[in-house]
Image (cartoon, rainbow, N blue to C red):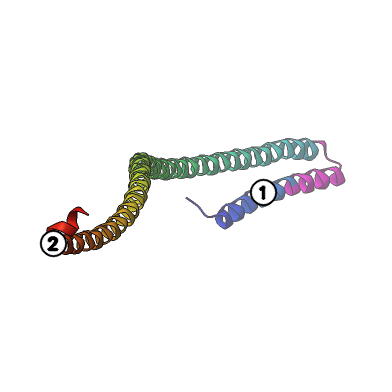
């Protein structure tokens, strides 16, 4: 591929040649007109037409070359964009696959966390149920303990009363035995009196 400067020089050379040909044709026609010769004027006119046609052909070939170069540049640019698009498409596909893998991983982690949360909630509910049952049992045991404590205190009070009563009865028994012993020790006569 030729560089832009080489094309500019080539274009400049071609256009310079075309301008020189037109200038030669103009000089030839002007010289023939000043010579007042019909033959020289006619020859200069034909030469001017031929040189103008050659300049037009050179300019036309320059225009075609410029168009071909521009088309080649556009084709190269399109190829570069196509390659860039292929690269970007591959990068996008890779990025999409990476993001999809991350989303899948996060979805899996979320599902696992939901399962773990459900399991933890079940365990918490079971623990709460057991705690409530134990609290009811503890409350019942506390009430029973209070009742037993009350009954124990009542039993201790009754035992104390019974012990006092037994002591009183023992004293009475001792007193009665003493009286009985004293009464038996009395002579028989006095006993009947």
> Residue 188 magenta-drawn?
no
Q: Which residue is mark 2?
A: 187
Q: Nearer the viewer, residue 113 or 59?
A: 113
User: Residue at (59%, 38%) from the top-left corner?
Assistant: 64
Q: Is residue 74 left or right of residue 89?
A: right
Within-10-Å neighbours for mark 2: few <14, some 14–19, many 20+: few
Measuring from the top left, give residue 25's x and y in whole percent. 74, 44
Within-10-Å neighbours for mark 1: few <14, some 14–19, many 20+: some
User: Residue at (36%, 40%) from the top-left corner?
Assistant: 129
Q: Is residue 138 left or right of residue 61?
A: left
Q: Give the residues drawn in magenta, as a range.
A: 23-38
- Label whose residue precedes the other's in the sequence (1 or 2): 1
Q: Secondary structure of the magenta portion, mostly?
A: helix
Q: Quadrant of residue 133?
A: top left
Whether residue 191 appears in this view of the structure is yes
Which numbered disc covers residue 15?
A: 1
User: Residue at (47%, 50%) from the top-left corner?
Assistant: 1
> Residue 25 magenta-drawn?
yes
Label 1 secondary element: helix
Label 2 secondary element: loop
Whether residue 113 appears in this view of the structure is no
Q: Nearer the viewer, residue 175 or 93?
A: 175
Measuring from the top left, give residue 86's x and y in whole percent. 42, 41
From what the image shows, is residue 155 above or below residue 42?
below
Measuring from the top left, give residue 45's x and y in whole percent. 77, 37
From what the image shows, is residue 2 above or below residue 110?
below
Q: Quadrant of residue 110?
A: top left
* Marks 1, 2: nearer the viewer: 2
């Amino acid at each position: 591929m030729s560089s832009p400067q080489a094309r500019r020089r080539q274009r400049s050379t071609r256009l310079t040649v075309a301008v020189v040909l037109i200038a030669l044709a103009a000089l030839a026609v002007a010289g023939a007109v000043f010579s007042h010769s019909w033959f020289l004027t006619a020859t200069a006119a034909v030469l001017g037409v031929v040189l103008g046609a050659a300049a037009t052909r050179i300019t036309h070939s320059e225009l075609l070359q410029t168009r071909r170069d521009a088309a080649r540049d556009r084709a190269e640019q399109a190829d570069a964009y196509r390659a860039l698009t292929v690269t970007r498409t591959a990068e996008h596909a890779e990025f999409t696959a990476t993001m999809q893998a991350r989303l899948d991983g996060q979805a899996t982690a979320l599902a696992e966390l939901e399962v773990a949360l459900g399991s933890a909630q079940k365990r918490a509910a079971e623990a709460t149920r057991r705690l409530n049952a134990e609290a009811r049992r503890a409350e019942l045991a506390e009430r029973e303990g209070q009742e037993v404590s009350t009954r124990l205190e009542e039993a201790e009070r009754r035992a104390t009363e019974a012990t006092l009563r037994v002591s009183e009865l023992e004293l009475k028994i001792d007193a009665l035995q003493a009286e009985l012993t004293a009464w038996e020790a009395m002579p028989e006569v006095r006993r009947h009196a």
